[in-house]
Image (spheres, rainbow, N blue to C red):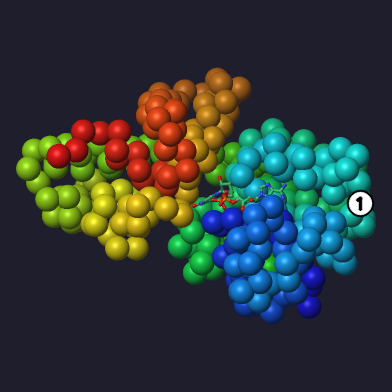
């Protein structure tokens, strides 16, 4: 069975790696956080002391890191992994990063004789735990086919978006929309509550009306409305506000580079800029509801 190295065992990478273990793969994992390594070991993974130890003997490397600079520093440069991995190794980066950064990493991988895919995901930590993520993949079709069985252990929808970087472009579009939906849903709930409505009742009404959306169905931002949502556990875990801000900045950057317009995305970005600047970067992004007056 394929031997996999998994780098980055955080909110998403931890449960994703655990699903690979469950599917029967041998998974060596590495993270800078001792807690993440302990949780990975408890899930049956093999924790490594270093990136190098994790990739020893691996046929596939999967990474799930916060942002582009982490991905570049893992793979590129004299001390990067691309200088050390055996030719033909399949490298799958699932982090959400800029499409141009992913294309640069893909070029460096090709120059080193490696096979590379950008494969960011959607579905949140619940989707990561349930193995129901959506993968948006950029790269060569043959490499996508090689990765398919492994990705299917972590997700149920696998989309080949196009050439290198295309997965990241799709992800940035999706997350810009998610940021807008979360900010808009929070705004609507706060408006109702300020005017005397019960947030649970209003959520039910809008969830069965034309305002229905993924946030209302799965990720309600109002505390106590949805037991399974981060809002009901103090906005811990989930998808950090600083990561959503990173994605909204990526959307603005992408719009600027392609002469596209993102007026709604930049409004959402401004809200998240203020929210993160106020010290809420580590809270789940649904905590944006705190930017609106509440009774
Ligand atoms: P996270 O901060 O929980 O996890 C990232 C992990 O990477 C941390 O445990 C950190 O210690 C580790 N790390 C950082 N640098 C490292 C290095 N050099 N070597 C080894 N480990 C290193 O973040 P997350 O929520 O898991 O998100 C990861 C990526 O997935 C981000 O790009 C994010 O935008 C994207 N994403 C997150 C969600 C979500 O709901 N949380 C959903 C879809 C996509």
Q: Quadrant of residue 35?
A: bottom right
User: What is the tally of numbered marks visible in this picture?
Assistant: 1
Name the residue rendered at 38%, 50% in the picture.
Answer: 235
The residue closer to the viewer here, 32 or 198, is: 32
* Most distant residue in the left direction: 196
Image-based side of 102 in relation to 254, left or right: right
Secondary structure beneath label 1 = loop
| Residue nearer the viewer, 132 or 290 | 290
The residue depicted at 45 percent of the width and 53 percent of the height is 238
Picture quadrant where residue 265 is located: top left
Q: Residue 243's spot in the image, x, y percent?
A: 52, 41
Q: Is residue 259 above or below residue 79?
A: above
The location of residue 158, given as percent across then percent down, is: 59, 60
Q: Which residue is mark 1?
A: 84
Crowd around label 1: few <14 · some 14–19 · many ≥20 (10 Å):
some
| Residue at the image position 45 percent from the left and 62 percent from the top | 126
In the shown orientation, is residue 186 left or right of residue 20? left
Q: Is residue 166 visible?
A: yes
For the question of whether residue 178 can be seen, the reply is no
The image quarter in which residue 28 lies: bottom right
């Amino acid at each position: 069975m394929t031997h996999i190295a998994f780098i980055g065992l955080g909110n998403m990478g931890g449960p994703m790696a655990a699903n690979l273990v469950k599917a029967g793969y041998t998974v060596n994992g590495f993270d800078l956080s001792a807690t993440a390594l302990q949780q990975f070991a408890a899930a049956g993974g093999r924790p490594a002391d270093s990136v190098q130890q994790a990739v020893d003997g691996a046929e596939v490397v999967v990474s799930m890191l916060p942002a582009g600079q982490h991905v570049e520093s893992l793979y590129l440069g004299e001390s990067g992994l691309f200088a050390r991995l055996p030719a033909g190794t399949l490298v799958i980066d699932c982090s959400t990063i800029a499409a141009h950064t992913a294309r640069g990493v893909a070029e460096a991988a090709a120059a080193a004789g490696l096979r590379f895919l950008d494969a960011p995901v959607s579905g949140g930590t619940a989707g990561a735990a349930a193995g129901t993520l959506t993968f948006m993949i950029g790269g060569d079709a043959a490499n996508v086919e090689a990765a398919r069985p492994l990705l299917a252990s972590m997700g149920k929808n696998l989309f080949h978006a196009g050439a290198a970087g295309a997965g990241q472009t799709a992800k940035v579009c999706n997350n810009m929309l998610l940021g807008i939906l979360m900010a808009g849903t929070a705004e609507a709930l706060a408006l109702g509550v300020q005017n005397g409505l019960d947030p649970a009742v209003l959520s039910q009404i809008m969830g069965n009306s034309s305002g229905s959306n993924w946030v209302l169905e799965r990720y309600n931002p109002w505390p106590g409305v949805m037991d399974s949502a981060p809002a009901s556990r103090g906005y811990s875990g989930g998808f950090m506000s600083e990561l959503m801000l990173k994605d909204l900045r990526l959307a603005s950057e992408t719009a600027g580079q392609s002469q596209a317009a993102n007026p709604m995305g930049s409004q959402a970005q401004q809200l998240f800029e203020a929210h993160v600047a106020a010290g809420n970067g580590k809270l789940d992004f649904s905590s944006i509801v705190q930017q609106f007056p509440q009774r």
